[in-house]
Image: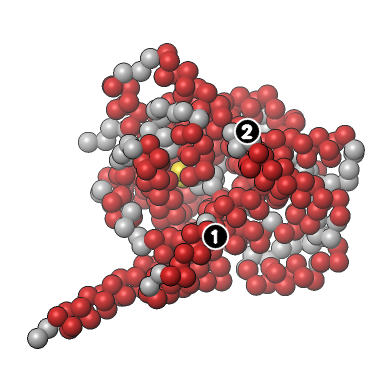
Amino acid sequence: MFVPKLITCLREGYDLAMLRRDAISGLTVAIVALPLAMAIAIASGTTPDRGLVTAVIAGFLISAFGGSRHQIGGPTAAFVIVVYGVIATHGYDGLLIATLMAGAMLVVAGALKLGTLIKHIPFPVVAGFTAGIALTILSTQIKDFFGLEMAQVPADFLPKWAAYAQAASSLDILTTAIALVTLGIILLLRSWKPAWPAMLIAIVVATAIVQLLDLPVETIESRFGEIPNHLPVPAMPGGITLHRLYELLPSAVTIALLAGIESLLSCVIADRLTGRQHKSNIELVGQGIANLASALFGGLPATGALARTATNIRAGALTPVSGMLHAIFLLLFMWLLAPLASLVPLAALAGMLVIVAWGMSEAERLVHFRHAPRSEQLLLAVTFLLTVLVDITVALLAGVGLALLLKGWAMLRARRSAAP
């Protein structure tokens, strides 16, 4: 039976003191999510308001219909490469159609109780493609971080770095300085005052420096225009035909797989932090509903965001009401602060995403693979390289397929050695 975790929590009893704690944690996460949503949208090859719309619509619905008490949903860095590739190949309408299809797939996967299967993807595969995504995200920020003058940035990894090398002479000192200031403030506050919203403070300081000194640094407004202060009217994307659906099927599968894996991974880690237990199949249904709605409002694919979920837990969240309030606070920020958000320098957002990419790579964990079995090292390396050089879908399928082959080979060897 489909019973969202929100209903379970409300049945247990909900009072004003709990609402107060959920409101404080929701506001805390909204402050963290505001600059991230814009940065992720820009890195994905679209406009910052698309990220905000996704965080509001999908963030509210993931909490309302999902299977976790603490999950915070919205646009995440893991989708940057997928979204960028789909937009480049099929246009933004193509992305919306693929997201609709992925949402439907997630609902069906949850209804068929496939959530437990996704959780069994081997950790070296997850670690490999996560590190690969992190490196690819880092590579997308070089132009804005250093202020390089480039008419177009190639989509593929190796041609992209070759283009950066050719444009290196156009490096802009002021742009680079703003990016480094942003990066430095985040690192300093994380070690000195970890409870403070380091990313938002860094963005505010960088924006203030650019505006007060009237520095010739590219901003959100100079590239994209002003950010709208309201949500768009929901509508079906145009150009939906059978041929188009078939053409976008691989992209939809990628979005659905990535959303399912990342959301359930976030839920598992949230359970470890709180001692609670999520409902994996209901979480998939909630993710599916959220992605369907996000596409109808012109937003991006969404999933559970691990860093924001952990922030929610540390801030004292008790129920999914916190995640719903986080979305409402973001809508208020969008309504009240859109003109100010338009002034944010793109270099500051690039500096912030460099930090996000580093955290996503989990470099400390990867070091431990030096002592792992050769089979796990092989899985990690293959998945990582295919993610960076080929495609996330290929990397996941190859990683899981190789894991099954290695497991089968190990079982066969065990039988042979046990035979008389």
Give how far across and how far down residue 14 sits, in percent: 35, 18
Element carrying mark 1: helix
Q: Quadrant of residue 142?
A: bottom right
**Vertical arrangement, residue 420 with respect to residue 361, above or below:** below
Q: Quadrant of residue 209?
A: top right
Decide if residue 336 is on the left or right side of residue 98.
right
Q: Nearer the viewer, residue 361 or 302?
A: 361
> What type is the residue that disc 1 sits on?
Ala
Query: Is any atom of residue 265 visible in this view?
Result: yes
Q: Residue at x 77, y 36 (%)?
A: 205
Q: Residue at x 67, y 46 (%)?
A: 187
**Vertical arrangement, residue 11 with respect to residue 286, above or below:** above
Residue at the spot of label 1: 363
Q: Residue at x 69, y 56 (%)?
A: 141
> What type is the residue that disc 2 sits on?
Trp
**Number of marks in picture:** 2
Counting residues from the N terminus, which is met first, the one under dot 1 or under dot 2? 2
Image colouring: secondary structure
Q: Residue at x 51, y 65 (%)?
A: 367
Task: Classify mark 2: residues with Cα within 10 Å, few (<14), some (14-19) or many (20+).
Answer: some
Q: Residue furthest left?
A: 420
Residue at the spot of label 2: 196
Decide if residue 320 is on the left or right side of residue 131.
left
| Quadrant of image for the C terminus | bottom left
Q: What separation in Å lies between label 1 and label 2 (alpha carbons)?
A: 24 Å
Q: Nearer the viewer, residue 319 or 324?
A: 319
| Quadrant of image for the N terminus | top left
